[in-house]
Amino acid sequence: MNMFYRSVLTVAMFSFYSTSWADKTFRDCPDCPEMVIIPAGSFDMGSNNGEVNEKPVHRVTIAKPFAMGMTEVTQGQWKAVMGSNPSNFSNCGDTCPVEQVSWNDVQGFLQKLNAKTGKQYRLPSEAEWEYACRAEGKQEYCGSDYVDSIAWYSNNGGFTTHPAAKKQANAWGLYDMSGNVGEWVEDIYHDNYNGAPTDGSAWPGDGAKRVLRGGSWNYGPQGARAAYRGWFEPSFRSNRYGFRLAKALP
């Protein structure tokens, strides 16, 4: 089936059926990341049992469905767009997440991918990320209270990244939201949630750091928690950090 019509059909199916979220996926091109349709809804963002920067817990309402990458952007997907592979763990292979990319590097990738596809891919907001991670649940991690079932992290990561989608997905069919690589999001980092947007939009500001979510292969279980927040300057690169795409739906 033509990819355009598959995308339209998938969005239409979302409106009328309540089948498994794993069925609600699409690709805009053969090399594009597979995207999962995330429903509209509300959730409580943050945690009263975690770090200071995870408070106060606040209600966020996302009024419209959007799409989220089923996996972190892989080395193969990065190479298809950029023609090179910056990853420290390049021997892990094309199905492993790309890493050693800064927030600024990701902006270059987005520009080229959008030019190639005629679409408007972007980074998710921090609120969209946590909403998609939680998938209407209240588990400690993104899809489970048992971290080993859903995450590559310091206790099982073996000091490297791993191929995408080898652990259990969350309820909406998203893989590796906890662990493997930490994921850049759009937001400027703030020390707490006082004054945070409640509509799911990215939080702007004059800060010098961008937010990272989800923990990585060398983080402990604390860093893989659904509410955990990290941050670095947008020029910072590390073999611990990559990203996942988001996209507005028609």
Image: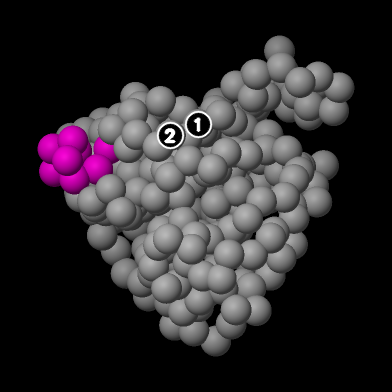
Residue lying at 74% horizontally and 62% vertically, measured from the top left: 199
Name the side, left or right, on which 238 lies relative to 105: left
Residue lying at 46% horizontally and 79% vertically, measured from the top left: 191
Q: Which residue is mark 1?
A: 170
Magenta stretch: give its range: 152-160
Q: Using the image, determine if residue 24 lies above or below residue 133.
A: above
- Residue 213 numbered mark, or none: none
Q: Using the image, determine if residue 190 lies above or below residue 142.
A: below
Q: Using the image, determine if residue 181 lies above or below residue 100.
A: above
Nearest to viewer (mark 1 / mark 2): 2
Query: Can residue 78 be spotted in the picture?
Result: no
Say whether residue 153 is magenta: yes
Task: Provide residue 243's location: percent of width, then percent of height.
Answer: 44, 50
Residue lying at 33% horizontally and 44% vertically, measured from the top left: 179
Q: Nearer the viewer, residue 25 or 146?
A: 146
The quadrant of the picture occupied by the N terminus is top right
Q: Which residue is mark 2?
A: 144
Name the side, left or right, on which 221 lies relative to 198: left
Labelled pair 1, 2 in contact (Cβ < 8 Å): yes
Q: Quadrant of residue 211?
A: bottom left
